[in-house]
């Protein structure tokens, strides 16, 4: 577990001193908040239920986590920053949903990778209040992919093989 050293009021997305230890004191940290270590390498996240998770932010030569989904899927914090490729494997039409920042507070700059592997067309869906800037929101064909980049609190840019 990690110990988060915070001076003053914690601010989401800020850098803090984080050390490894057998215990942690996250009581001063609000739920649904993320923090980076001083090197920007690790992001720590306190979920809406108070659980602590962490993952790598910008490490070189890392392997992607494969997230196969046979039906509709909503992005989660574990998909954070290109550490995951979500493979939509359904034979039927399916949706990949981008949630509101208030539900999943991805940091600005987060990249989400989505591939349509199955025959069912994958549609990128913006939860009400989310804007996705793209030429279309349907992945154009099987074995094609799209990258979503968070550019503001509830705004994403989509790049890749999309169609209207």
Image (cartoon, rainbow, N blue to C red):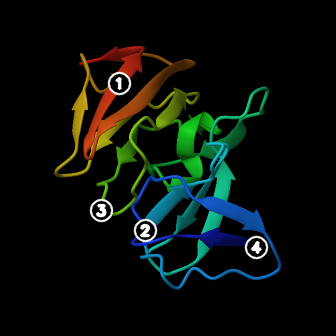
Residue for badge 3: 102
Residues at discs 3 and 4 in contact (Cβ within 8 Å)? no
Distance (Cα) linking label 3 and label 1: 20 Å
Q: Is residue 105 above or below residue 64?
A: below
Residue for badge 2: 10
Nearer the camera: disc 3 or disc 4: 4
Tell me which label, 4 or 1, sits earlier in the chain.
Answer: 4
Residue for badge 4: 1
Residues at discs 2 and 1 in contact (Cβ within 8 Å)? no
Figure disc tally: 4
What is the crowding at mark 1: few (fewer than 14 residues within 10 Å), some, or many (at least 20)?
many
Q: Residue furthest left?
A: 129
Quarter of the image where the C terminus is located = top left
Distance (Cα) linking label 2 and label 1: 31 Å
Secondary structure at numbered mark 3: loop
Residues at discs 3 and 1 in contact (Cβ within 8 Å)? no
What is the crowding at mark 3: few (fewer than 14 residues within 10 Å), some, or many (at least 20)?
few
Secondary structure at numbered mark 4: loop
Q: Nearer the viewer, residue 51 or 143?
A: 51
Q: Residue furthest front?
A: 7
> Residue at image x 25%, y 45%?
154
Distance (Cα) linking label 3 and label 4: 25 Å
Distance (Cα) linking label 4 and label 1: 35 Å
Indicate left or right for 109 with 118 as reference. Answer: left
> Residue at image x 52%, y 55%?
77
Residue 158: give its label.
1
Nearer the camera: disc 3 or disc 2: 2
Is residue 89 in view? Answer: no
> Residue at image x 30%, y 41%?
125
Distance (Cα) linking label 3 and label 2: 17 Å
């Amino acid at each position: 577990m990690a110990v988060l050293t915070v001076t003053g009021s914690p601010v989401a997305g800020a850098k803090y001193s984080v050390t490894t230890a057998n215990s942690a004191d996250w009581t001063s940290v609000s739920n649904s908040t993320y923090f980076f270590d001083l090197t920007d390498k690790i992001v720590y996240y306190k979920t809406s239920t108070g659980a602590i998770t962490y993952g790598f932010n910008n490490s070189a030569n890392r392997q992607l986590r494969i997230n196969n989904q046979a039906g509709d899927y909503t992005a989660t914090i574990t998909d954070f920053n290109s550490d995951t490729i979500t493979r939509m494997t359904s034979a039927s039409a399916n949706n990949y949903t981008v949630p509101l920042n208030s539900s999943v507070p991805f940091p600005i700059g987060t990249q989400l990778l989505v591939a349509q592997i199955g025959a069912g067309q994958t549609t990128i869906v913006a939860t009400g209040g989310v804007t996705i800037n793209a030429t279309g929101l349907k992945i154009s064909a099987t074995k094609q992919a799209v990258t979503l980049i968070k550019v503001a609190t509830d705004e994403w840019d989509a790049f890749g093989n999309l169609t209207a």
